[in-house]
Amino acid sequence: MKVLVLGSGIIGVSSAWYLAKAGHEVTVVDRLEGPALETSYANAGMLSFDYSTPWGAPGVPFKAIKWMMQDISPLLFSVKDFDANTIGWMMKMLGQCTQSAFDVNKERMLRVARYSADCFKELRAELDIPYDGRQKGTLEVFRTEKEMDGAAGDVAVLERCGVPHAMIDVDACLQHEPALANVREKIVGGLYLPGDETGDCFKFTNALADECKKLGVTFLMNTSIDGLDVQKGKITGVKTSAGTLTADNYLVALGSYSPHVLSKVGINVPIYPLKGYSLTMPIIDESKAPVSTVMDQTYKVAVTRFDDRIRVGGIAEIASYNKELQAKRRGNIEFTVKDLFPGAGDVEAAEFWTGLRPMTPDSAPILGGTQYDNLFLNTGHGTLGWTMSLGSGKFIADLMSGRTPDINPDGLAVSRYR
Ligand SMILES: Cc1cc2nc3c(=O)[nH]c(=O)nc-3n(C[C@H](O)[C@H](O)[C@H](O)COP(=O)(O)OP(=O)(O)OC[C@H]3O[C@@H](n4cnc5c(N)ncnc54)[C@H](O)[C@@H]3O)c2cc1C
């Protein structure tokens, strides 16, 4: 079967890998010059298999008001960029902040994320993929007793979902992250999740793309996609800057830009481009650097260790498709790395980056078929696309190959929004 995969981010490339393994003739199309140059380029690097949790949760609307009053806030609004789409998406997202919606969404996310964890293990056993990968867990640190007590709700959810975790004191935090000894007085404890991992998504995507090429996958880069041709309820081609491309089956993995192509054929995916920022810096003093991911609970900023670099990432900015790199946002994320790991990295030499998370209002990705028999979707992974990548790729490849996927598909397809 001939398959066109639209998009060469981590999601498109993971899908291409499993489709090629299933024996299909695969072509990946993207407007950029190489894989993972859009949102998959410099994300926070966390493989949060066990901590996959929806943004919409009871209490979030109140927390959002509190955050808006903080000097260094994890949630920002660029009101000048607001449009009807922004307001509509925010209303849908607020509608997901009930306990019952949270439970449904959490189960869907964990289903995909945990499957993805298995796929990562399987892939590591099969291929030697260089991606600065580490399997040392995530440590969420608390700066006040109040914050630590406030984690009780999260811990109850982890217990209910059977996720391995431990609430730990400061000494135990230092055992996992020895460099925190330099700022011992700033933390009161932590939540440790041993099953989480870390790694550079850009390196991984490009290494996997090279493996795809060995299996015969073609990468058609510098090619922009303008729309899909439809005839008699089927997709008959993709209109691109290189002419119309045809295949038997088509997969949309265009991240935050998926709605632009899909809305033209009557598929409305409620994906919003939720803007985030990261800084990547060389390590100058190994003894002061983190060994894995440290999540600063107060500011919702993640500090992640790659081999010889530190990545710090966070902020959710509601700014539509505005990708302007706002210098004032840099201070928000720079603060955490300087405060928790002073002297570890060369902050002045850091690469400052912004990306748009393809966020659904219910936080779960959109995986599955559409009203067109030969059109499939693997998109809307929001804050956790790197985490869910391999699981989503294998799932969709099985579905497109006519095989029964390893995980239950219920509630994952776009039809859940009807
Ligand atoms: C600051 C930040 C931190 C994050 N941290 C984490 C984390 O720690 N862990 C985690 O799991 N996830 C994280 N994420 C989320 C994760 O990065 C995304 O979910 C993931 O990268 C989405 O991958 P994708 O392949 O769907 O989209 P993308 O990587 O954006 O790929 C889509 C591709 O489609 C192409 N494209 C779009 N439109 C067209 C068109 N018209 N024609 C041709 N090509 C087109 C683009 O060029 C692009 O290559 C973070 C995101 C941000 C912004």
Image (tube, rainbow, N blue to C red):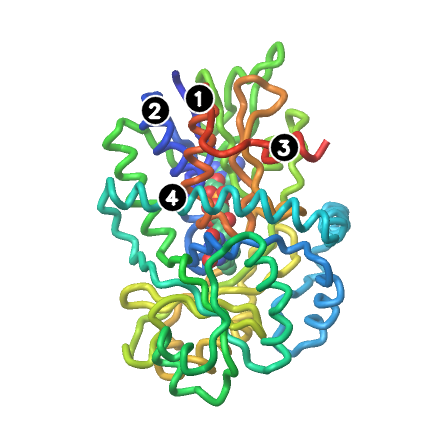
Q: Residues within 10 Å of mark 2 (few under 14, many from 20)?
A: some
**Quarter of the figure with residue 365:** top right
Whether tag 4 and tag 3 are in contact, CB under 8 A, the answer is no
Residue at image location 32% in from the left, 51% down from the top = 203
Mark 4 lies on residue: 118
Whether tag 4 and tag 1 are in contact, CB under 8 A, the answer is no
Q: Nearer the viewer, mark 3 or mark 1?
A: 1
Decide which of 164, 59 is in the foreground and name it. 164
Q: Is residue 214 left or right of residue 22?
A: left
Measured Cα–Cα span from mark 3 to mark 1: 19 Å
Q: For numbered disc 4, what is the local secondary structure?
A: helix
Question: Disc number at residue 22?
Answer: 2
Measured Cα–Cα span from mark 2 to mark 1: 10 Å
Whether tag 2 and tag 1 are in contact, CB under 8 A, the answer is yes
Q: Position of residue 112 (x, y in %)?
A: 50, 42
Nearer the N terminus, badge 4 or badge 1?
4
Question: Disc number at residue 403?
Answer: 1
Looking at numbered disc 3 in the image, what kind of residue is underneath it? Val
